[in-house]
Image (spheres, coloured by chain):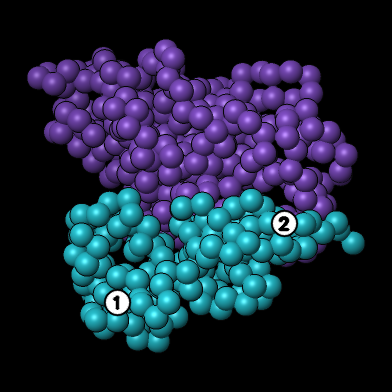
Chain colours: A purple, B cyan
Amino acid sequence: MKSFEYIRPNSMGEAFQALGAYDNPFVLAGGTDLLVWMKRDVHVPECVVDLKGIPDLNSIRYEDGFRFGALTTVREVETSLLVREKIPTLCEAAGSLGSVQIRNRATIGGNLCNASPAADMAAILLALDAEVTVASPKGEKMVPLNEFFAGPQQTVLAKEEVLSEITIPTATEACKGVYLKHGPRKAMDIGTVNIAILLDADSESHCCNQIRISLGAVAPTPMRAGEAEALAQGKTLTPEVIREVAETAAGEANPISDFRASADYRRELIKGLVAKGISKILENGRT
Amino acid sequence: MEKKHQIHLIVNGELYDLLVRPNRTLADLIRNDIGLTGTKKGCDQGDCGACTVLANGKVVNSCLVLAVEMDGASVITIEGLQQGHDLHPVQEAFVEKGAIQCGFCTPGMIMTTKALLDENPCPSQADIKHYLEGNLCRCTGYVKIIDAVNKAADLLK
């Protein structure tokens, strides 16, 4: 790694000062993405600003919906009894990220700010209609997660802005969910295609009351399959309807061909996985 | 030239006072500045687990931790497990079950096993495989490693 200045502010104010004082600063949370980029010289920051000295950025609170501090580790989310009780799919998605060693350091905030289209926490949080709090010297503003990503590895954060909190409204709590991450390995991989589905359907009639479908690694950013969701809304989820929903979702995606898969194969995976995910939720009745 | 930082950390129960560059990883600090070479560098990017250590009770890839982040921390490496001449039960289990071929992945495997059994003294086979996902072995095919984890769980009861 090239050399850099290291600053560990004790407050958000000090963090903003540090970010403002350098041309090319980078925020450090868990380091499991940033340090890899730095070792490859993809990011060469003048200064690394370590947020871990700032109090109150690491907590899991539930008050009419979840509030996660941005520095909450992925492992903390994975093992939280409260999260498992309310949103088990969030635990499932968290548990699919990397390894225990990585999850002990990786943070939700960091996963979102690294902004890989394949980010595991992004896909599920997008389905959960999460919002993020962006803090800056000017104050705080809420940004819906579906407006947070600007492109691969790009967010809307300006230089002196810091993602401080992630909130999840309660609207999806009636849903059961599934997180399907497809790849050549069972672990330690970035998804070829990731699917997060939340579904509230009548257990007898399979009539869809509410559905959220989130797709990862198939577009410049993580995305929701809005047309597929609209198609399913209010319908009875027969195998034919499920197939149509899955095909619609595949049509909404904009995958690239890369070393993991061709764009065509990714579209096929979306069709298969969305159908599989919906069926699984209907069968199990629970995650 | 970037500013160096004075850090204090405990490694295997001993206090170290070191002046480090910001770009020094914990793995390099442990191996080169402290001289404990049991912790290995396999990939240097968090994929193989050979550099696994316990930092404040949690297993981490020391190649992805900056030394400066560990100011005030307590770290345990593979060298910290044995008591004098007595091997830690996890180490004993690995030896007994023939779970060591070249030995390069072994320190990382043992640290992860210890962390697993600290959290979950009676892991299922699925629990074991899931927990050890971040530790790669190119020699053994993992069967004897899993045998060793099971044996270690018995020994620790």
User: Given the current orientation, which residue lies at the most extreme front position?
Assistant: B84
Residue A90 percent coordinates (x, y): 37, 34
Q: Quarter of the image for the C terminus of chain A: give it.
A: top left
Query: A122 and A193: which one is in front?
Result: A122
Which residue: 51% across, 77% down?
B38
Marks 2 and 1, how far apart at CA: 34 Å
The crowding category of the residue bearing disc 2, from other C-alpha atoms within 10 Å (few below 14, some 14 to 19, many at least 20), is: some
Circle 1: element type: helix
Please indicate whether residue A132 sits to the left or right of residue A48 in the image: left
Q: Quadrant of residue A2?
A: bottom right
Q: Which residue is pictured at 41% across the width and 72% down the height? A: B83
The residue type indicated by label 2 comes to Ile
Q: Quadrant of the N terminus of chain A?
A: bottom right
Residue B44: image quadrant is bottom right
Q: Residue furthest bottom?
A: B102
Dot 1: chain letter: B
Q: Is residue B138 above or below residue A123?
A: below
Label at residue B7: 2
